[in-house]
Amino acid sequence: MEPSDASLAERALAGSDDAFGQLVTRHQHQIYAYVFRMIGDTHAASDVAQTVFVRAYRSLPQLRDPGKLRPWLFAIAVNQARNWLTRRRPVAASTEWADDDSAAGQGVPDPSLWASPDAVYAAEELATVIVAAIDSLAPTYREVAILRFQHQMPVGQIATALGLGFSATESRVRRAKALLRSKLATVLSDR
Amino acid sequence: MQGRTTLGDDMDCDWVRQHLERILDGECSPDTKGQLAEHLHLCPDCAEVLRVAEEEERVLRAALPPVGVPRDLAPEIMASLPVAKRESRGATRSALFLRFAVPAAGVAALLVLALGLGLWLGGDPRDGQSRRAGAMPNAPAVATLSGFSGTVSLPAEAGAAQPTEVGMPLWLDAVLATAADSAAEIGFGGKVRVRLDSESRARVTSSSSILLVSGRLFVWVEEKGTRFSVTTTQAEAAVHGTEFCVDSRLEGRTVLTVVEGVVVFGNGYGSVEVDAGLQSQAATGAVPTAARPTDVLPIVAWAGIGEQDLAPRIDVGLRVRLGQDEAPPTFVVELDYPDRAYVPLWVSCEATDSEGRIVSERSLQASSRAHRYRVRKMTFPGLGPGRYHAGFRVVGRAEANRRTVAFEVK
């Protein structure tokens, strides 16, 4: 049986680089995937993901609940990706995203949109459309969408990663979905 | 149709729509789940909303393709951990602080900190106290004057310099001053050596710290794991098993240069990590500047560090080519590394105009870590039309590979 994150984190905290190495091996795919989806550059994603683990290594003594290592790692990844975006994104781009918030409704899922999209569109084509829609979200909603759909996180874990309360996170997930629906409705209806 | 079915006191259609996410996650209490099941049984609208939400969730989750992770990522992370580990055990923070870490393969490291001399022209506010304490034989001897050349004085309270001799003890708060022709070396228990440069003044503040009043000093921490810090009224350079230099001769700013290892350089306004071969500057009231490549050889020469004390240089292959038909012109920088452990490296890039003036400077992080081969792209944004030359060189403990490429901005 593989050791739990909690036991590996405790061993790493006690000075075991081998234990930390196992945690890196276990979580590198998810952390890299999150960072890559957020910033869209493979070299930069590699550097940022590396920084995430180095910061985690330094900050292990501050990990209060070793059982929540995964959302804690994601919290570091969220911050590092935000830092990268803040440094690299041109100002003009962020003004484009600013419209997102006003477009976000509080609607419920649209039955016509989700009736049977995978029957109408080839899986790869649908994936391309959805990835593009997520990429076009403002970072605030993109990080929620990636954590929710790429990493299959429940609201509680997303809340930990974002440093938000449960209700605020639930609201943000709802708005991210509403934005996606809005963007996807336009794209899918044109096809 | 928007349902308004109400069940009990706290379950209605609005509640269902507002809390779809926690319903999808199953993050409801058993009581709530029971009420929800009952509500859905009575409200076909909400049942349909939930069904579509589940379908939406399924499609979105299934649509995102997996992301492949670079094969070298885990080795790179692990290769960089020893640096992080030492940093994490570094110094406590003060108004301005430094923490230093030696790379896994490195033996020695050096940093230079230059502090606004103007701040100390009026003298160290604690100097009077230091003279008394330094002259107090009952205080514990915390260091030794292990060597000197030229005229070195131990200013006493009355102003008359005490005679100095090699091997004499230095008590807590002893002040040491050098003249234009002199230098001194202070030993701290065989673990740390401090070289005080000419026209410098420093005070021994404990067995593991020294206050630099003015001038410049160099510190060797000879036993790994030993903590040592250099403090000024404005700054602290604290280390954990390395070698570094503090320089207080420049006006109005603090300059940090790192030859090897990594330094966290910061103050109350923020901090930056400064890698080997880079320099950052800090002024009072502002976050230190982003680290930029610099030539560390003059510092190495000044400090008299032998090549044997530094990690061996590595020979990094550097190739630069100009991308085709890209605007602005984009350079592809290719780096080949030998098979060895982490060595922090950077590529410094300068664009010069037809008259040889530097019109743009950039840098690329090129740390080899576990890479054997790396490609980075860079541009010089904002250049006006004209012909230019782009100069590239590897900065750090690497052979001085340089490449120059001519290019034109139309």
Image (spheres, coloured by chain):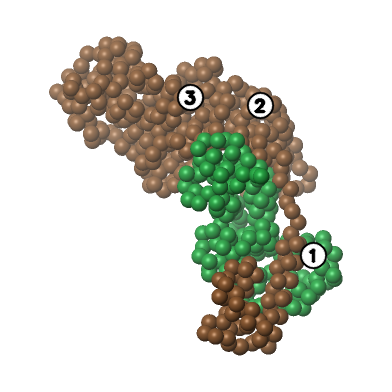
Q: Are marks 2 and 1 in contact (CB under 8 Å)?
A: no
Q: Amino acid at mark 1?
A: Leu
Counting other residues with Cα less than 10 Å from the Cα at mark 1, is it few (<14), some (14-19), or many (20 or more)? many
Helix, strand or loop for disc 3? helix
For residue B48, above or below residue A69:
below
Cα separation, mark 2 vs mark 1, equals 44 Å
- Identify the chain of the residue marked 2, using the numbered disc in the image: B
Amino acid identity at mark 3: Ile
Mark 3 falls within which chain?
A: B
Q: Residue at x 46, y 29 (%)?
A: B111
Residue at the disc numbered 1: A126
From where the camera sits, is residue A12 visible?
yes
Chain in green on the image = A
Q: Which residue is painted at 44% across and 47% down in the image? A: B270
Label 3 and label 1 in one chain: no
Quadrant showing the N terminus of chain B: bottom right
State the brown chain: B
Residue at the image point whose x is 53% and y is 69% from the top: A167
Q: Quick check: A127 above or below B193?
A: below
Q: Amino acid at mark 2?
A: Arg
Q: Position of residue B157 (x, y in %)?
A: 16, 25
The spot of residue B215 in percent (x, y) is 35, 27
Q: Is residue B248 left or right of residue A23?
A: left
> Viewed as shown, does residue B125 lie left or right of B336?
left
Which comes sooner in the sequence, label 2 or label 3? Answer: 3
Q: Chain of mark 1?
A: A
Q: Which mark is residue B340?
A: 2
Q: Nearer the viewer, residue B355 or B40?
A: B40
- What residue lies at 63% left-to-right and 60% top-to-bottom? A153
* Mark 3, residue position: B299
